[in-house]
Amino acid sequence: MNIGLTGGIATGKSTVARMLVARGAALVDADRIAREIVEPGQASLVRIAERFGAKVIREDGTLDRRLLGSIVFADAEERKALEAITHPAIRELMRERIAALEAERPDRLVVADIPLLYESGLQHLYEGIMVAYVPREIQRIRLIERDGMTPEEADKRIGAQMDIEKKRQLADYVIDNSRTIADTEAQLDRFWRSLKSGTVPL
Ligand SMILES: CC(C)(COP(=O)(O)OP(=O)(O)OC[C@H]1O[C@@H](n2cnc3c(N)ncnc32)[C@H](O)[C@@H]1O)[C@@H](O)C(=O)NCCC(=O)NCCS
Ligand SMILES: Nc1ncnc2c1ncn2[C@@H]1O[C@H](COP(=O)(O)OP(=O)(O)OP(=O)(O)O)[C@@H](O)[C@H]1O
């Protein structure tokens, strides 16, 4: 059994993923895989340097994420060019990791945490989609507080993604993470109980 877990930036995907793991799920995290495929020596990093220039590689050979972020979140064309390089590599590694986890323990829930699941049209790859939701104003505040972004940077990031209200409508299962952590835990308890009793509406 697998589910895709998505939401907007800073709506609580990692928080919800942690709660699922605490209950016994296995996790594959697209943001982490996105970092692995641009480590020094990886083909994707070479292609990024070719497309965006040597300036995006730091002296120690690692990707300057802040600089590349400032380029791609200011210009949709540039963002598409980066995605054309990174997304196929991310998708392939995700597929391999999920298949390995499912083969290892078929009884265990595998959760794929993918921020751009709907934007990339990947929903058909999963048995159900869970969305970690908060209203946009809370999303913006949490993003600014967590990452120290300026309000302008935060708005650009949020604006590069599908509206969180739309994702909520598309979801099979919504976790409303706008209240306390304890409230979110209680929603996860309900989800986990219905999963175990075979009544989860996915
Ligand atoms: C541009 C990069 C270098 C900026 O790195 P940075 O460390 O600042 O951000 P990080 O990778 O931790 O991403 C944080 C969040 O930004 C959002 N985000 C990242 N890439 C994108 C994108 N192409 N479009 C919209 N939102 C994005 C996601 O919500 C993600 O969770 C990096 O995000 C990147 O390589 N993006 C392309 C790969 C990708 O699409 N990753 C996202 C999911 S697979
Ligand atoms: N219920 C909550 N109440 C208060 N703060 C919360 C709650 N849930 C999450 N947070 C905080 O909001 C921020 C965003 O949460 P989290 O990192 O889980 O989001 P995310 O969707 O995984 O983000 P990203 O898209 O960047 O990976 C974090 O600083 C987290 O500690």
Image (cartoon, helix red, strand yellow):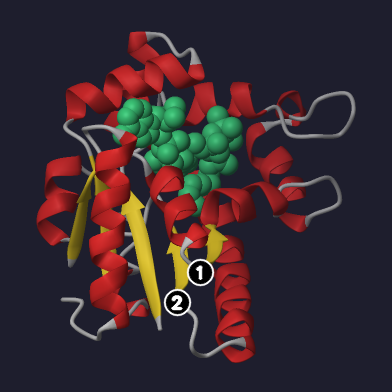
Q: Residue at x 70, y 31 (%)?
A: 53
Callout 1 amino acid: Gly
Q: Which residue is mark 1?
A: 24
Q: Look at the numbered disc 2 and say if its residue's Cβ is closer than 8 Å to ligand 2.
A: no
Q: Which residue is mark 2?
A: 109
Residue 126: image location, x then y, percent: 35, 77
Q: Residues within 10 Å of mark 1 (few under 14, many from 20)?
A: few
Classify residue 31 as left or right of residue 194: right
Q: Residue at x 20, y 77 (%)?
A: 200
Q: Quadrant of residue 90?
A: bottom right
Relative vertical location of residue 3 with respect to residue 80 in this rendering, above or below: below
| Quadrant assignment for the C terminus | bottom left
* Label 1 element class: loop
Q: Residues within 10 Å of mark 2 (few under 14, many from 20)?
A: many
* Label 2 element class: loop
Classify residue 150 as left or right of residue 175: right
Q: Are marks 1 and 2 in contact (CB under 8 Å)?
A: yes
Q: Quadrant of ligand 2?
A: top left
Classify residue 7 as left or right of residue 170: right
Callout 2 amino acid: Leu
Q: Quadrant of residue 149?
A: top left
Q: Tell me, yes or no, if residue 79 can be seen here.
A: no
| Quadrant assignment for the N terminus | bottom left
Relative vertical location of residue 26 with respect to residue 32 in this rendering, above or below: below
Q: Earlier in the sequence, mark 1 or mark 2?
A: 1
Q: Tell me, yes or no, if residue 72 can be seen here.
A: yes
Is 95 or 174 nearer to us in this picture?
Answer: 174
Is 56 or 36 nearer to us in this picture?
Answer: 36
